Amino acid sequence: MFPFRRNVLAFAALLALSSPVLAGKLAIVIDDFGYRPHNENQVLAMPSAISVAVLPDSPHAREMATKAHNSGHEVLIHLPMAPLSKQPLEKNTLRPEMSSDEIERIIRSAVNNVPYAVGINNHMGSKMTSNLFGMQKVMQALERYNLYFLDSVTIGNTQAMRAAQGTGVKVIKRKVFLDDSQNEADIRVQFNRAIDLARRNGSTIAIGHPHPSTVRVLQQMVYNLPPDITLVKASSLLNEPQVDTSTPPKNAVPDAPRNPFRGVKLCKPKKPIEPVYANRFFEVLSESISQSTLIVYFQHQWQGWGKQPEAAKFNASAN
């Protein structure tokens, strides 16, 4: 009984030592940088694992992106995309009907306006991200700049992950919005929900904004995380398992590729091809195996076993 108890205690100690390795990973991204430097500077004073997403045409875009980078924070481009609802749009908002060249121009401009960016996430975008062919054009442009895509998931049937297939663009997905309500109690509830999801699933991404109430909650909670929760940058989750819950669009005709591969032409047989039945298949296989070099070698060896060489026979008869 004593050895069993000792083994149990040793196993428990091993689990305790390995708990940091099994910690849940929590990534926090603060959107809408570039308009409120006072609030944004308060975010930049927090742990550098918090990532920030900068609106590319905001008045303080370059300034805040540079400050964030110099403070050790990861920088994303918070790229405006068309919503389903009618509302005022940011300059250079991506729309599904735009050409590939126009989308590439907007992304190039955003990259120039937001230095040090390593990824992009969508600002609004329920109309754009739910359009597969529009998002395919986005992913093709992102691949040129080696940027990852953080899907803010502003609509359930987002096509971002599906659109990235066949490209080198990695896609990760937001799981929690911290401040749909700007009430501090509600923000705390959402923050704790993010912690629970990180603990349950191994990792999670929460998105918030530099509202005064959000800043106050973050100042209180990021310094008091449970010991099994680790604050990480968004890009550290790029290799975490992602689940695509989207459905393909109905009755959609994809854009024709620029240089389509039409395949190799097949030669038509002059005579009808005779069917090959199972018994004939095994006959051919048996013949092929029996004629192989290795089998022939072993046959000769087998036939020689137990036989005396001619010289040995002659010597035996002479004696």
Image: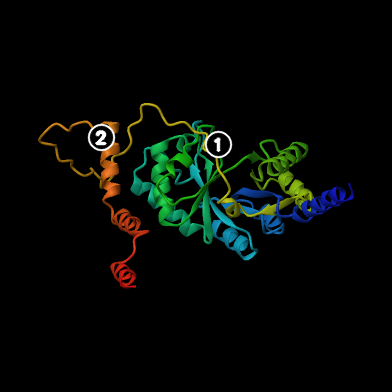
- How many numbered tags mark residues here? 2
Amino acid marked by disc 2: Arg
Residue 2 visible to an observer of this rendering: yes
Residue 254: which quarter of the image? top left
The single residue placed furthest to the top in the displayed view is 251
Name the mark on residue 240: none
Q: What residue lies at 28% left-to-right and 32% top-to-bottom?
A: 279
The single residue placed furthest to the left in the displayed view is 270
Q: Earlier in the sequence, mark 2 or mark 1?
A: 1
Residue 59 visible to an observer of this rendering: no
The residue carrying mark 1 is 154
- 269 or 276, nearer to the observer: 276
Crowding around mark 2 (Cα neighbors within 10 Å: few <14, some 14 to 19, many 20+) is few
Amino acid marked by disc 1: Thr
Q: Position of residue 104 (x, y in %)?
A: 38, 51
The single residue placed furthest to the front in the displayed view is 319
Q: Which dot, 2 or 1, sits closer to the camera?
A: 2
Relative to residue 72, is residue 100 depicted above or below? Answer: above
Q: Position of residue 310 (x, y in %)?
A: 28, 67
Name the mark on residue 280: 2
Q: Position of residue 10 (x, y in %)?
A: 82, 53
Q: Position of residue 236 (x, y in %)?
A: 60, 54
Q: What residue lies at 36% left-to-right and 47% top-to-bottom?
A: 102
Split into 4 quadrants, where in the image is the C terminus? Answer: bottom left
Please state if 150 lies on the left or on the right of 263 as rendered: right
Asked if the residue at tag 1 contacts the one at tag 2, i.e. Cβ–Cβ closer than 8 Å, the answer is no
| SS category of the residue bearing label 2 | helix
| SS category of the residue bearing label 1 | loop
